[in-house]
Image: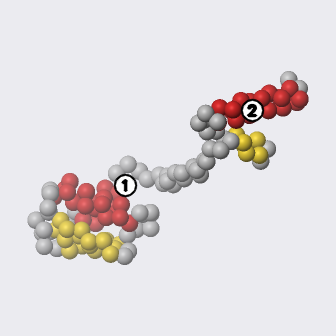
């Protein structure tokens, strides 16, 4: 195909899409920094950064820190450097306590760069 043929085909396609736009079709075509159509395109969502950790790494970490506390004892855990989301870290602590000791056996308090764990029963 020659460049003129490609240009003519492109112009006809845009003309066809523009005609369909009057009937409610929305489109957007980007070619050589030119925009055609009235469709608004939002920016793509950025994906979370994937950080590889071995399976069970957080579980092992919490087991070492919380495994030996007795009922009535408070343990203060500093949020480690590898943790991106502090609230997710507190939730994983809560989940670990539930799985190890049962429902209602611990209270979790997150403040700043630390998470306090009180074992109740």
* Residue under numbered circle 1: 57
Depicted 43 relative to depicted 14: above or below? below
Near-viewer residue (111 or 36): 36
The residue at the point 83 percent across, 29 percent down is: 8
Q: How is the image coloured?
A: secondary structure
The residue at the point 37 percent across, 55 percent down is: 57
Residue 62 at least partly seen: no
Q: Residue furthest front?
A: 22
Q: SS of the residue at dot 1?
A: helix
In the picture, residue 120 is in which quadrant?
A: bottom left
Q: How many marks?
A: 2
Mark 1 or 2, nearer chain start:
2
Q: Quadrant of the N terminus?
A: top right
Image location (x, y in percent) of residue 29: 70, 40
- Asked whether, in this view, residue 116 is left or right of residue 39, the answer is left
What's the CA distance linking mark 1 and mark 2? Answer: 58 Å
Image location (x, y in percent) of residue 69: 19, 68
Q: Quadrant of the C terminus?
A: bottom left
* Residue under numbered circle 2: 15
The residue at the point 59 percent across, 36 percent down is: 24
- Asked whether, in this view, residue 59 is left or right of residue 18, the answer is left
Q: Residue furthest top?
A: 1
Residue 13 at least partly seen: yes
């Amino acid at each position: 195909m020659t460049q003129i043929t490609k240009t003519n085909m492109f112009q006809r396609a845009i003309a066809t899409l523009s005609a369909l736009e009057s009937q409610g079709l929305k489109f957007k075509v980007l070619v050589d920094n030119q925009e055609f159509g009235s469709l608004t395109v939002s920016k793509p969502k950025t994906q979370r950064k994937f950080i590889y950790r071995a399976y069970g790494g957080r579980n092992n970490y919490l087991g070492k820190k919380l495994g030996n506390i007795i009922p009535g004892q408070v343990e203060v855990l500093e949020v480690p450097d590898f943790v991106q989301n502090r609230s997710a870290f507190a939730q994983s602590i809560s989940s670990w306590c539930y799985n190890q000791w049962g429902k209602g056996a611990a209270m979790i308090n997150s403040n700043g760069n630390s998470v306090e764990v009180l074992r109740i029963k």
